[in-house]
Structure formats: structure tokens, C-alpha cells
């Protein structure tokens, strides 16, 4: 090694001279946070019927929908005959111009039924799953209330994407064959919305929240580079000074489900493994069928984040939580280290989740509600479907018909109350990032955000609490 190169190495290993500017660590922005227990279930019982949910849903939304219908149709008339309200579906008379209120039921022959489970039990190869169960030639639209059910027809229905479980008012008349010909339809629309408090930081910095879903930490990729890049960015350890200052404006990370990958048995061929299967253990777990590496990796990542940034963790379809919605918080035993921050910066919440961050109200789901609805309507516009969920005032209308749900008896928590219009509606684990702002008749504005799966896209969404403008950030590493 020459003397010049030795001098360079000698200088490199020493502390820089004083004329080199040093970076001052950025202080993270702090925000206030309030969480709701709306979707928590303290005592579970499955002895009651699921049909009570439809009755509770109808009783809650009927006054709202009827008031909107009354205002819209009070002066409606055809050939001198004025429309009037009929209280029960079975009280409609043929040829009588009237309007009725009830719950939609879609009779769809292609919809999955109990026969699919029977074929599995009988070891018959089931048909491949369908992406959509819609067949315009076979599907029938019904309206039902506590008195009975009537079939709806008419070209007006083609203007509305209807699914089972929503409450509507329909205007029309009964035909000779007993069907109700619909000429107009009304829904509940957006509920009232609380104003956003005006908060400005003294130093003029922004207040932001990071939204992510589908980390998909699994046995084969629990050391994924993209996940570590995300953690390093949020901790201010990646990029330059501008990146560190930007990361410091993010006060909270909301993980919208599927933080763990879908579970698979380590022993694929059960028949071949029966002879080699170890004897069952009385204590502990069987390492041959259980791999704790994914949960250990997630706990490690959360533990590195929690001293610096608050984390809200929602369960998802692939996570070790109850299958039926609302999913209850992931158990603290899964996070032996991260749970030490319970009650401070670590928040294990339900799916769906309702909360406020600096007065901005959030309503978030892990995506099961939209994914299930997607199968029963035409088209691929998930953003428009998300808007309908809010305007119907029911974020899970297909529960409990095709989306597994707990059989509530006191009230349907999926129905939005009169003052429950969120400022931000987040749906996780979607194919791609999409966003829009929907407006109500009373000045309500809701920012709708579809958050893509991180394991597929490497993307998260950063939301500005001052403007409610989202920004997509990508951590994808090209192979």
C-alpha cells in the first residue's frame, strides 16, 4: 500500500473535521389519538339466530330511508294518481302507485351454497372458484320486511348496483303477476359528519399518518428486504436529511390486516407423514406442524418501531384471529416483546376499526367486506363499490349472508349511526392504490383510500392530516 492510500485510510477511520455539517436528529411529530370499542365483543354466544341482524338493520335504517323517500316522492304522481307510502310489502295492491321500504335480497343461482361443503365432505372435486357470481339472466332482486318478500323488476334497477342486506325504498306499482315494477329507488346516503378541528403546529410542520396492509410476513420471506426498508424509513434510518425530516412528520403507522402470510401446514402429504408423525406433546407445540418464525419476525419489526412511532395493528383474513367479522384484536401472546408497549405506542384493534387522530375520524377495514361485495356486482370499479358502502350506511352488507359474521342481538355495528360519517375511509389489501373524495348533500366530504398489499406492490400510503391528501410511497426492490 502506498503512503497516499495509507493516509486516506487513516483519515477515513477518524472523526470528520469540524467544518463538515452534522445532521440534527429530527423530532417526531406527536398527535392525539382516541379509539372506539364499537366492534369489540366481550362475551360470545352463537346460540341466537343470524336473522335478527337483518331485523335490527331494517329498524335502524328504515326511518332514515323513509324520510328521504317522503321528501323525494311526496309530490310524485302519474295520470293524476299521487304516490303514497305502504307500511308492509305484502299490503301492496296491484296497480297501486306507492312506495315501500325493506331489505334487498339477491337470489343468485351461482352464489355458493351448502352443496359446496357437501362435495368437500364426499371427496368430490369441487368446481373452480368463480371471480364473480353475477348472471343478469338468472339473478332476481327481492325486497323483504317483517311481513314477507316481493320480487322487484324494472329498468330502474339497472341503474343501481344492489347486494343482499342493504335497506332501500322503492317507488312503483305491482304488476298482474305479483311483481313490483320499480320506477325509482332511494338509499340512506351519508350520515352527518363532525367538523375537523383546525390544528396547526407551531413550527409549521405537517402531520401525517402511514397506512399499510398485507405485509405478508411468512416462513419463506420473514426477512423481506422491502419490510426492513419500510421500517428503516419510518425510523429515520434510510435516505438523506430530507427523508428523515419527512419520516418525522409521520406520527402513526396503521397496519390494515394480513401482516402475516396465509398459514400453510409444514407437512403437505398427510398420508405419507402419518407413519413419521411424532407423538403428540402434552406441553408446548409440535415444531413439525408449527413455525413461529413469522410471528417472531413481526414481533421483532414492531419492537423496533414502537420506541419511535405509534402503531395500530388490525387483524386480517390471513392473520391468526377469528374468521368472522368483526375480527377481534390479535392476542398479546403473539408479541412477547411488542406487547410491552401496550397502552402507550402499541394498539391492537379490531377489524373494522374506528378511531380519531387529532380530530380526524378514521373508519378502516382489512378488505374482507369489499372483497366479498365485489363477487356479487358487475364491473371492477372497487372505488365506486367503496362509495356505495358509505352511501348505504352499511360497511358490510353481505354479512351474515356470505361474509361470516357474529350474530348480533342488540344492534348491527356495521350500520353507520347518524353522526358516524368518517373523514377517512380506508380499505386494506386491495390490488392497487386508488383514492377519491365523495361528498354528501349536507357538505360531508370523505376521503376514500384503497391501500394495496405491501407484499405484492411494496407500496404504502401516507396521508396528510391537514389536507387529507394521500401520497403513495414505494419500497419495491427490483430483482
Image (tube, helix red, strand yellow):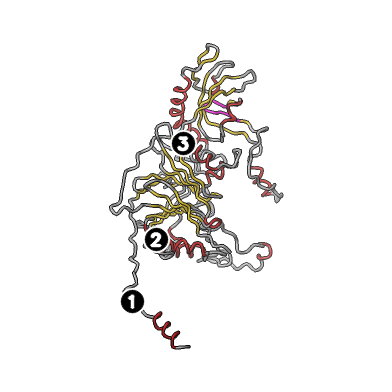
Above or below 305: residue 432: above
Q: Quadrant of residue 106?
A: top right
Q: Which residue is mark 1?
A: 17
Q: Secondary structure at mark 3?
A: loop
Alpha-carbon span between mark 3 and mark 2: 41 Å
Task: Give the x, y percent position of residue 468.
Answer: 41, 46
Which comes sooner in the sequence, label 3 or label 1?
A: 1
Q: Which residue is mark 2?
A: 242
The residue positioned 43% from the left and 29% from the top of the image is: 64
Above or below 388: residue 245: below
CB within 8 Å, label 3 to label 2: no
Task: Give the x, y percent position of residue 62.
Answer: 46, 29
The label shown at residue 393 is 3
**Relative side of 29 to 371, left or right:** left
Task: Give the x, y percent position of residue 241.
Answer: 39, 63
Alpha-carbon span between mark 2 and mark 1: 23 Å
Segment tinted magenta in the rendering: 141-149
Which comes sooner in the sequence, label 3 or label 2?
A: 2
Which comes sooner in the sequence, label 2 or label 1?
A: 1
Q: Nearer the viewer, residue 80 or 49?
A: 80
Amino acid at each position: 500500500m502506498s503512503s497516499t492510500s495509507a493516509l486516506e485510510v487513516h483519515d477515513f477511520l477518524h472523526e470528520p473535521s469540524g467544518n463538515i455539517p452534522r445532521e440534527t436528529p429530527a423530532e417526531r411529530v406527536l398527535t392525539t389519538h382516541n379509539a372506539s370499542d364499537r366492534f369489540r365483543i366481550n362475551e360470545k354466544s352463537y346460540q341466537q339466530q343470524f336473522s335478527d341482524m337483518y331485523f335490527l338493520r331494517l329498524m335502524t335504517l328504515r326511518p332514515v330511508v323513509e324520510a328521504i323517500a317522503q321528501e323525494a316522492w311526496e309530490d310524485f304522481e302519474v295520470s293524476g294518481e299521487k304516490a303514497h307510502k305502504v307500511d308492509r310489502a305484502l299490503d301492496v295492491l296491484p296497480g297501486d302507485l306507492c312506495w315501500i321500504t325493506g331489505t334487498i335480497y339477491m337470489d343468485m343461482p351461482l352464489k355458493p351454497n351448502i352443496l359446496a361443503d357437501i362435495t368437500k365432505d364426499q371427496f368430490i372435486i369441487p368446481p373452480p372458484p368463480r371471480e364473480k357470481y353475477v348472471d343478469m339472466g338468472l339473478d332476481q332482486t327481492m325486497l323483504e320486511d317483517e311481513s314477507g318478500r316481493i320480487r322487484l323488476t324494472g329498468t330502474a334497477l339497472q341503474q343501481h348496483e344492489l347486494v343482499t342486506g342493504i335497506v332501500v325504498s322503492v317507488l312503483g306499482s305491482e304488476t298482474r303477476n305479483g311483481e313490483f315494477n320499480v320506477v325509482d329507488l332511494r338509499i340512506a346516503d351519508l350520515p352527518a359528519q363532525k367538523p375537523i378541528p383546525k390544528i396547526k403546529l407551531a413550527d409549521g410542520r405537517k402531520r401525517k399518518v402511514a397506512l399499510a396492509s398485507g405485509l405478508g410476513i411468512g416462513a419463506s420471506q420473514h426477512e423481506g428486504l422491502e419490510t426492513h426498508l419500510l421500517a428503516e424509513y419510518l425510523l429515520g434510518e434510510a435516505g438523506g436529511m430530507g427523508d428523515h425530516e419527512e419520516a418525522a412528520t409521520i406520527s402513526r403507522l396503521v397496519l390494515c390486516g394480513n401482516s402475516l402470510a396465509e398459514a400453510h401446514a409444514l407437512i403437505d402429504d398427510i398420508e405419507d407423514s402419518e407413519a413419521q408423525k411424532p407423538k403428540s406433546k402434552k406441553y408446548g407445540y409440535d415444531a413439525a406442524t408449527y413455525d413461529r418464525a413469522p410471528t417472531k419476525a413481526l414481533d421483532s419489526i414492531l419492537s423496533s418501531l414502537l420506541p419511535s412511532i405509534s402503531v395500530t395493528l388490525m387483524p386480517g383474513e390471513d392473520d391468526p384471529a377469528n374468521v368472522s367479522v368483526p375480527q377481534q384484536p390479535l392476542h398479546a401472546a403473539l408479541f412477547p416483546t411488542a406487547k410491552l408497549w401496550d397502552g402507550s405506542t402499541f394498539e391492537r384493534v379490531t377489524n373494522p376499526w374506528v378511531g380519531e387522530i387529532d380530530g380526524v375520524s378514521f373508519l378502516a377495514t382489512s378488505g374482507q367486506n369489499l372483497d366479498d361485495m365485489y363477487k356479487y356486482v358487475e364491473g371492477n370499479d372497487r372505488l365506486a363499490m367503496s362509495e356505495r358502502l358509505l352511501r348505504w350506511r352499511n360497511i358490510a352488507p353481505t354479512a351474515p349472508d356470505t361474509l361470516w359474521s357474529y350474530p348480533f342481538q342488540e344492534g348491527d355495528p356495521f350500520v353507520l349511526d347518524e353522526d358516524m360519517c368518517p373523514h377517512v375511509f380506508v380499505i386494506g389489501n386491495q390490488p392497487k392504490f386508488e383514492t377519491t373524495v365523495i361528498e354528501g348533500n349536507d357538505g360531508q366530504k370523505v376521503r376514500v383510500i384503497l391501500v394495496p398489499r405491501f407484499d405484492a406492490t411494496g407500496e404504502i400510503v401516507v396521508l396528510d392530516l391537514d389536507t387529507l391528501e394521500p401520497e403513495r410511497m414505494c419500497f419495491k426492490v427490483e430483482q
